Image: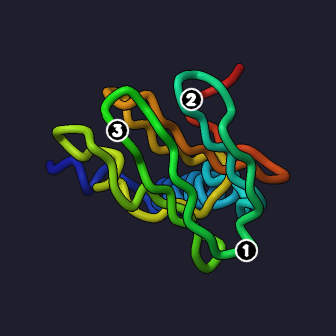
């Protein structure tokens, strides 16, 4: 007797309902809302706070040189950075509340703030 023969129609219904509930929880609780403003830090201190509604470019000076932060179409990204591996540049555009890009060697970070924050771990 195979294992699939032991599964009844009610078991499949419970499985599908549970999978749908998990998908709904993921869609509603995992992601933060749309970002409203951005906080830019350099050397651990806030260098600038800006609205995501205004397109602009902000230079931030760090120990390795100048990082360029670009704000465009309600999104923000690190456009250029003197760090060797370019991880924060490769992260791309950020638009949701709670998202961040951190350039560790140059001590520059960008964080989006909004009405709600995304969860990055389980809370209990």
Whole-percent x and y of residue 18? 57, 52
Quick check: 108 above or below 113? Answer: above
> Considering depth in this image, is 55 or 37 the residue closer to the camera?
55
Spot the residue most to the bottom. 73
User: What's the colour scheme?
Assistant: rainbow
Does 53 sit left or right of 26 as displayed? right
- Seen at 61% across and 80% down, the residue is 73
- Where is residue 121, by image quadrant? top right
Does 114 sit left or right of 101 as displayed? right
Q: Which residue is mark 3?
A: 65
- Check disc 3: other Cα within 10 Å, few if <14, some if 14-19, many if 20+: few
Do tag 2 and tag 1 residues touch (Cβ < 8 Å)?
no
Q: Which mark is residue 121?
A: 2
> Which of label 2 and label 1 is nearer to you?
1
Of labels 2 and 1, earlier in sequence is 1
> Considering depth in this image, is 95 or 76 the residue closer to the camera?
76
Of labels 2 and 3, earlier in sequence is 3
- Where is residue 28, by image quadrant? bottom right
Whole-percent x and y of residue 83? 25, 38
Do tag 3 and tag 1 residues touch (Cβ < 8 Å)?
no
Q: CA distance from mark 2 to mark 3?
A: 34 Å
Of labels 3 and 1, earlier in sequence is 1
Do tag 2 and tag 3 residues touch (Cβ < 8 Å)?
no
> Which of label 3 and label 1 is nearer to you?
3
Q: Secondary structure at mark 1?
A: loop
Q: Which residue is mark 1?
A: 54
Q: Secondary structure at mark 2?
A: loop
- Check disc 1: other Cα within 10 Å, few if <14, some if 14-19, many if 20+: few
Whole-percent x and y of residue 97? 68, 52
């Amino acid at each position: 007797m195979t294992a699939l023969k032991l599964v009844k129609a009610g078991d499949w219904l419970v499985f599908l309902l549970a999978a749908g509930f998990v998908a709904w929880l993921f869609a509603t609780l995992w992601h933060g809302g749309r970002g409203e403003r951005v906080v830019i830090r350099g050397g651990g201190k806030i260098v600038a706070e800006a609205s995501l509604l205004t397109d602009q470019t902000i230079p931030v000076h760090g120990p390795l040189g100048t990082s360029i932060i670009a704000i465009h179409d309600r999104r923000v990204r690190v456009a250029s950075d003197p760090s060797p591996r370019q991880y924060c540049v490769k992260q791309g555009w950020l638009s949701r509340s709670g998202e961040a890009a951190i350039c560790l060697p140059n001590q520059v970070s960008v964080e989006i703030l909004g009405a709600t924050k995304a969860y990055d771990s389980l809370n209990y």
